[in-house]
Image (spheres, helix red, strand yellow):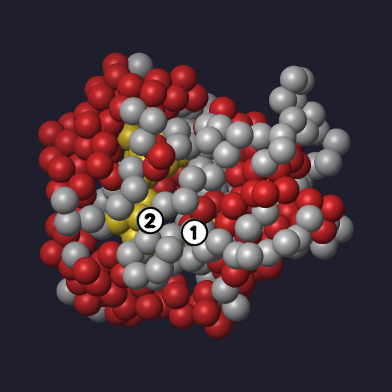
Amino acid sequence: MAVRRGLEVPVVERSNSTKSVSQAIDLGRMQPYSIGVASASVTLGKHPPLPIIALICYGQTYGLWNDFSPFFSPFMQLAPFFPLIHKVLRPTFPTCLWTGDANSATIALTFDDGPHPTHTPQLLEVLDRYEIPASFFWLGACVHRSPHMAQEIWQRGHWIGLHGYQHHSFPRLSADELKQSLAKTQEAIAHACQVDLAYVQQNIRDVRPPNGLFTPQTLRYLQQWNYRPVMWSVVPEDWVRPGIDIVTQRVLSQTCNGSLIVLHDGYCGGEDVAKTADRLIPRLLDQGYQFVTVDALWQQAAIGVPVVKT
């Protein structure tokens, strides 16, 4: 997965780890390195076995890329593999929100890594024009830097979720560090949006892990702290900027009833987000889809996780 630029620290932490693939794959204990390894028996025709694909997606975060370099180009696009990974991870981690109701033509458009002082205002203009509700997963550091932008999104009634204070992969944080990262982000939101902190703590509890990285222990922590883990079903890899046409085509080809679409309005990928949304929204509307928030998908899914009180 491409390394995205950070704000104060690198967005994706890269280690000098010399762990081998055999050390990384530990099906029994589900170590952070093996989060994508949900089924060792799944193969994908001419594609590499799924555990290898999953480790390609996540290996760079842990300094494992060199283990795969003899077999895969470091510049290969990972977008084709995300739908395949989704098919395995969704049933393996059923308490996460992956999609909405497959029988309902409703979809959620979500944006990670913001708010951004330039990209997000342009995106809001598009959402306003089409009167589309969206869901934003904020970095606390970005909220702190752009409080007025955060307030504008809040006042428009879009759904807000947490993405951590900095863009740090959750498995690399201790329990206390993770808890503080989420709490600090809530505090930044309360201050920026001029909302009572107790209200934010009670109502803004959807969490999307940065880089899509989590472990079973991560999910246990989130459940213990009464957060709701939100994942994805459509990931067009917009952060590497393959082009608006390509991102649009990927989303259109993968979207179906209940889809949870991930785009980015932050420092990487956000450059194109407004134009991408401007192309996607009318075409998806023409196909009969209705845009809803992540909270609406939770209500459709009804999978027995803590319900946010509104």
Residue depicted at x 70% and y 43%:
68
Q: Residue 231, position in %: x, y? A: 52, 48
Where, by quadrant of the figure, is residue 162 drawn? bottom left
Where, by quadrant of the figure, is residue 290 drawn? top left
Give the position of the C terminus as an image quadrant.
Answer: bottom left
Q: Which circle marks residue 12 in the picture?
A: 1
Residue depicted at x 84% and y 53%:
22
Give the position of the N terminus as an image quadrant.
Answer: top right
Q: Nearer the viewer, residue 98 or 254?
A: 254
Identity, as a three-letter code, of the amino acid under mark 1? Val
Sequence-wise, the earlier of marks 2 and 1 is 2
Q: Residue 268, position in %: x, y? A: 34, 48
The answer to whether residue 88 is visible is no
Q: Is residue 271 above or below residue 143?
A: above
Tell whether 212 sits left or right of 33. Answer: left
Q: Which circle marks residue 5 in the picture?
A: 2
Identity, as a three-letter code, of the amino acid under mark 2? Arg
* Picture mark count: 2
Q: Could you say whether the residue bearing mark 1 is in a helix, strand or loop?
A: loop
Q: Is residue 118 above or below residue 82?
A: below
Residue depicted at x 21% and y 61%:
150
Q: Residue 159, position in %: x, y? A: 32, 53
Q: Residue 84, position in %: x, y? A: 64, 31
Q: Which circle marks residue 169 in the picture?
A: none
The answer to whether residue 42 is visible is yes
Q: CA distance from mark 2 to mark 1?
A: 8 Å
Tell whether 51 sits left or right of 193. Answer: right
Residues tagged 2 and 1 counted as in contact (Cβ below 8 A): no
Outermost residue to the front: 70
